[in-house]
Amino acid sequence: EPVDRPAGQLSVNLRPELIADRDEVLASLEDDSVTLVDSLPPAHYRGEMAMYARPGHIPGAVNVPVFSALDETGSYRSLDELASIFEGDRDGRAINYCGGGIAASSNAFVMTRLGFTDVAVYDGSLQEWTADPENPMEVELESPDSED
């Protein structure tokens, strides 16, 4: 049954620091105080497969695959388990990226829950980054003997 509710007031609190753009990511390549977090699977990070214009990852990025934050039921792991996965400077800038910002948003959520204080998502992610051949990419192919 429809329910009548009194009209409410929506207050918007924009937080632009939660979104990183291409220029900020490019500048971060020369800034050791910024951590880039690649949220894609290891094979994509290494460049063994490509879903976007070029394979690999943004130089200097660490790989924290989004599914590593989930247990076998698809729920987020405990905070203690997550803390062992998401390491680093909790007060430094951390920019998460993936292909289009979705997996990166999950990692950013987890990092915020863990107490990281300056977390952002590069919403253009690799879809935007790899489309410009001027943006650098790294490929780290492993030997055929290595395990994933």
Image: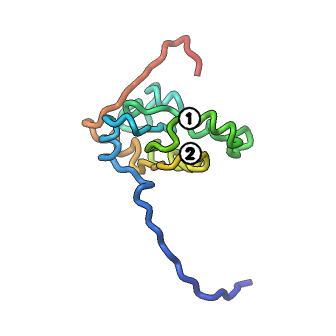
**Residue 14 falls left or right of residue 132:** right
Circle number at residue 87:
1
Quarter of the image for residue 70 reads: top right
Residue 43's place in the image compared with 125, above or below, is above
Circle number at residue 28:
none
Residue at point 71%, 39% (across, down): 71
| Amino acid tagged 2 | Met
| Amino acid tagged 1 | Glu
Local crowd size for mark 2, using a 10 Å CA cut-off: few (<14), some (14–19), many (≥20): many
User: Which sits in the foreground, 58 or 53?
Assistant: 58
Q: Describe the element under mark 1 as helix, strand or loop.
A: loop
Q: Position of residue 27 (x, y in %)?
A: 30, 41
User: Which sits in the foreground, 38 or 13?
Assistant: 13
Residue at point 40%, 39% (across, down): 34
User: Which sits in the foreground, 73 or 115?
Assistant: 115
Q: Position of residue 114 (x, y in %)?
A: 60, 45
Quadrant occupied by the N terminus: bottom right
Q: Position of residue 40 (x, y in %)?
A: 51, 37
The residue most toward the front is 91
**Residue 75 falls left or right of residue 95:** right
Residue at point 63%, 40% (across, down): 69
Circle number at residue 111:
2
Quadrant occupied by the C terminus: top right
Colouring mode (rainbow / by chain / secondary structure / one colour) = rainbow
Q: Position of residue 138 (x, y in %)?
A: 37, 27
